[in-house]
Image: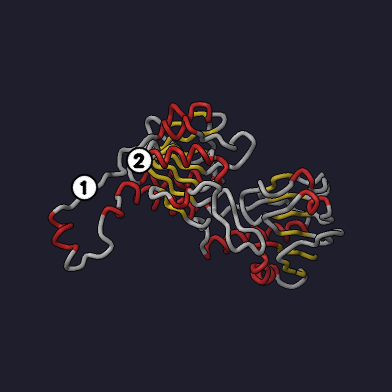
Amino acid sequence: MKILVAGLHAPNAPRLAALLGAGFDVLAAKTLPAQGKIDVDVLVTNRLAPDEAARFGGRLVQVPGAGVDAIAVDAVPASSNVCNVHGHEIPIAEYVVHAVLEHFLEPWRLPATLDEKNWPAVYADRPYHREAHGNNVAILGYGHIGAEIARRVQALGMGVIAVTRGGQVKSSVAPDDVATTRELETVLTRCAALVLCCPLTDETRGRVGDAALRALGPRGLLVNVARAEVVDEAALHDNLSAGRLGRAVLDVWYRYPGAGETSVTPARLPLHALPNVRGTPHVSALTPGLLERRYDVIAANIRALRGGTALRHVVRPAV
């Protein structure tokens, strides 16, 4: 069985080969062929353009992540399965908890160093900070990630309002309240933070706009670990610049460097330069534990494909 690990995940081909063992030919490529059939049994990639998808001749497109918005699923031949994989909810939930606690503890108000000059002055005029306890967090999207975030912020004594399309959740981690996406603006008037961990779809693209950001308010926090485009970029910049939204922690961006690009801003508008924005380079899930969990599932799916047993995390089954 021939497997190709392509794109950003190409360096993980040796990891996958070690997990699969003998009988599997695992290849790596930074880019897919520009033309001709992509003649492998399994393609492991997080990006697949329509023309590339149409040229795939194998049985499984395995996305090494949860998001499939960069995969042209409809163009993948009907004889091929498309699967994704989770495992990122633990580090992302920890990232979000850090962002929430930082927002309430406000460490930027303190000097970076307690030297002989700063110590007497800051001790004499120590600033109060706020408490996370007793505040509400709205979580837009309540799947694997949303539930793990809820588990942790509830342990801090915070209330969780799950915001989903149908106003229902399927999780062992029960939120304190549930609302539909249509009710988002109303919900945010009683929340201190909004966390985005929903997939990017036609319905969610731009869903968080001016009205939602104004409802969150000048002391509110937005944390985006979903996709940048869930938030209207102009509305986000305007509300942060004007102080109508308190702060934003952004781990996902509107623009990403392409192959060979050495000078790219992460957004069309200078969000990264605003003093009330904490920007990180799409790192919330990047831990060694994540790779172990994901590639264990990927290897299991490839063995299942060869053995004719059920695949896990099927986004679109073969017909």
Q: In terms of depth relative to the viewer, which is nearer, 103 or 272? A: 272
Tell me the quadrant of the picture where the C terminus can be found: top right
Image location (x, y in percent) of residue 287: 51, 62
The single residue placed furthest to the right in the displayed view is 36
Amino acid bearing label 2? Met
Tell me the quadrant of the picture where the N terminus can be found: bottom right
**Label 1 with label 2: CB-CB less than 8 Å:** no
Image location (x, y in percent) of residue 288: 53, 65
State the image quarter where residue 62 is shown.
bottom right
Local packing at callout 2 (Cα closer than 10 Å; few below 14, some 14-19, many 20+) is: some
Q: Secondary structure at mark 2?
A: loop
Q: Which mark is residue 128?
A: 1
Image location (x, y in percent) of residue 53: 79, 51
Instruction: Relative to 300, say whether 183 is above or below.
Output: above
Compared across the picture, whether 97 is left or right of 140 comes to left
Amino acid bearing label 1? Tyr
Image location (x, y in percent) of residue 233: 53, 41
Q: Which mark is residue 300?
A: none
Q: In terms of depth relative to the viewer, which is nearer, 219 or 5? A: 219
Give the mark, 1 or 2, whose residue is nearer the N terminus.
1
Q: In terms of depth relative to the viewer, which is nearer, 67 or 89? A: 67
Q: Residue at x 80, y 54 (%)?
A: 59
Distance, label 1 to label 2, CA atoms, is 20 Å
Q: Residue at x 76, y 54 (%)?
A: 60
Compared across the picture, whether 100 is left or right of 36 comes to left
Q: Secondary structure at mark 1?
A: loop
Instruction: Relative to 262, say whether 130 is above or below.
Output: above
Local packing at callout 1 (Cα closer than 10 Å; few below 14, some 14-19, many 20+) is: few
Question: Which residue is identified by label 2?
Answer: 158
